[in-house]
Amino acid sequence: MSAGGSRRFDSSVQAETEQGVLKMLNEQVTLDRQVESAKGAVVMQPDFNTRDAFRIFDIDQKGTLSAADIKYGLADMGVHVTAEDVDLFVQRHDKNRDGRLDYREFAEAFTPQDPYYASILARRPGSQRRVNPYRKDDLFSHSTACTFKELFRTMLSTEGSAEATR
């Protein structure tokens, strides 16, 4: 092959690679927007607050959540996910790298980036209701519980997609 043909092939491969990278980045931006939209939807549920959401998973009241706590809590709510997806979620939001999420880290994961929605969520206190061991998401109305579960599903699927992109 001539030197000119080789350069055309190289530039063609480079253009194809750049298009592939741009496509993956666009897909990730779309997924991130879906997560933010889902966060906004759950914040607009009047009974949603991060304290009660945390309590759903913190059954032993240690104040921190392991990936297993989250996986079992989701399963109890009817959301079946892989351990790998939950591990990725914990790794992303575990700021102090202790392998667990404390309340602050958990709350940050569910707080929208939009300051308006974030301020709404920050002002909501937790309820004093007990966690029902048979229906943990009973702390919320049916509509809120469904919206929260959908948010969690969206966040976990986004983590899997982001990991595949990396």
Image (cartoon, rainbow, N blue to C red):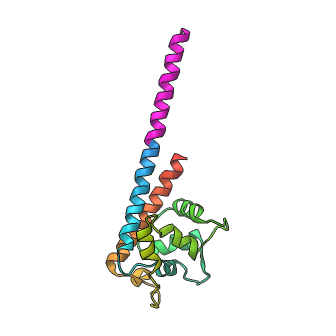
Q: Residue furthest top?
A: 2
- Report how many numbered discs are placed on residues in the image: 0
Depth check, front residue: 47 or 112 = 112
Which residue shows up at 50% across the image and 62% down it? Answer: 82
Which residue shows up at 47% across the image and 23% down it? Answer: 12
Q: Is residue 115 left or right of residue 94?
A: left
Magenta part mainly helix, strand or loop?
helix
Q: Horizontal and vertical percent for residue 156?
A: 47, 61
The reply to whether residue 72 is in sight is yes
Q: Residue furthest left?
A: 143
Q: Is residue 146 magenta?
A: no
Q: From the viewer's perspective, is residue 110 above or below residue 62?
A: above
Depth check, front residue: 127 or 91 = 127
Q: Is residue 41 left or right of residue 32?
A: left
The reply to whether residue 79 is in sight is no
Which residue shows up at 58% across the image and 83% down it? Answer: 60
Q: Horizontal and vertical percent for residue 149?
A: 40, 70
Q: Is residue 22 magenta?
A: yes
Q: Horizontal and vertical percent for residue 48?
A: 40, 78
Depth check, front residue: 151 or 77 = 151
Q: Horizontal and vertical percent for residue 81?
A: 47, 64
Which region of the structure is painted magenta?
A: 1-23
Which residue shows up at 37% across the image and 76% down it? Answer: 145
